[in-house]
Image (tube, grey):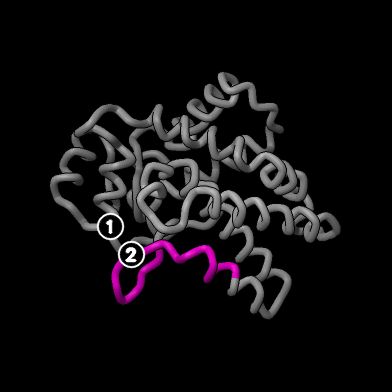
Amino acid sequence: MANGASRTGLIVDANVKDFFRGLVDTVVCEQNVNARDDTVHYIVNLLSNFAYSDCLFEHTSEGRTIKPLALTYAEALQASSVHERNHALRRLGDVALFMAGMFSHSLRRKVVNIEYYISMGGNAYGYLSDATRSTAQWHTFSEVFAELAEHFAEFVDVLGEVSEEARLGSDSDVLRLYELWVRTGSRRAERHLRRMGIALAPAGSASRQH
């Protein structure tokens, strides 16, 4: 993953997964969160994948945006197969956890508050935990989904602290600059990110799934 340019989004010279792994491990220990190794690994993968903008944002006629949780939930209800439903609910849970934890400061300015994200995300993971226990493809995730559902608010706090630890100061705020670049294509934000050793892959490159 390091130094790759074939995917769209935030690519750090140092392995981005190692970066997030170190932060998450530290925060989990400091906050005394009793989390399974598999759950910590899942969260690290979530952060690493959403560091690539095409994994988090969707392209619409109005530009890059994040689909509202309610629409993702509606897609899950209308899914034509169990597989599609599970993927939609996993997407809902992942986005809710990421946004509630990493961008809680932005949610304070929105009509939909952080409690909504916690409720929607926790319920999505809870349903997935029950629905995947007896399926071969998803069985390995069942206990992870169960822990994420039961302790969703705690993991939001973990990601909130990870977000704070990743902030390097006003003009060097990696997450704020990255969010600005993704939403607006700001050249100023891009210059700051590149000065910090962050390479931004060209738009239109292939995205990843996790």
- Kindly identify the residue that appears in the image at 56 percent across and 19 percent down: 30
Q: Work out whether residue 144 or residue 21 is closer to the camera in this orientation and state it.
A: 144
Tell me the kind of residue under disc 1: Arg
| Horizontal arrangement in the rendering, residue 70 relative to residue 89 (left or right) | left
In the displayed structure, does residue 13 sit left or right of residue 47?
left
Q: Are marks 2 and 1 in contact (CB under 8 Å)?
A: yes
Marked residue nearer the N-terminal end (2 or 1): 2
* Rendering coords of residue 204 (x, y %): 32, 64
At horizontal 81% and vertical 60% (from top left) the residue drawn is 135
| For residue 23, above or below residue 43 | above
Using the image, tell me which numbered label, if any, was put on residue 183: 1
Decide: is 170 above or below 88: above
Q: Residues within 10 Å of mark 2 (few under 14, many from 20)?
A: some
Quadrant assignment for the N terminus: top left
Q: Is residue 7 visible?
A: no
Q: Secondary structure at mark 1?
A: helix
Q: Secondary structure at mark 2?
A: strand
> Compared to 115, does 167 lie above or below?
above
Q: Which mark is residue 64?
A: 2
Taking the spot 54% from the left edge, 53% from the top edge, the residue there is 117
Give the residues in magenta.
58-73
| Tally of numbered tags | 2
Residue at 41% from the left image edge and 44% from the top image edge: 103
- Percent position of residue 172, x then y: 23, 32
C-alpha span from label 2 to label 1 = 6 Å
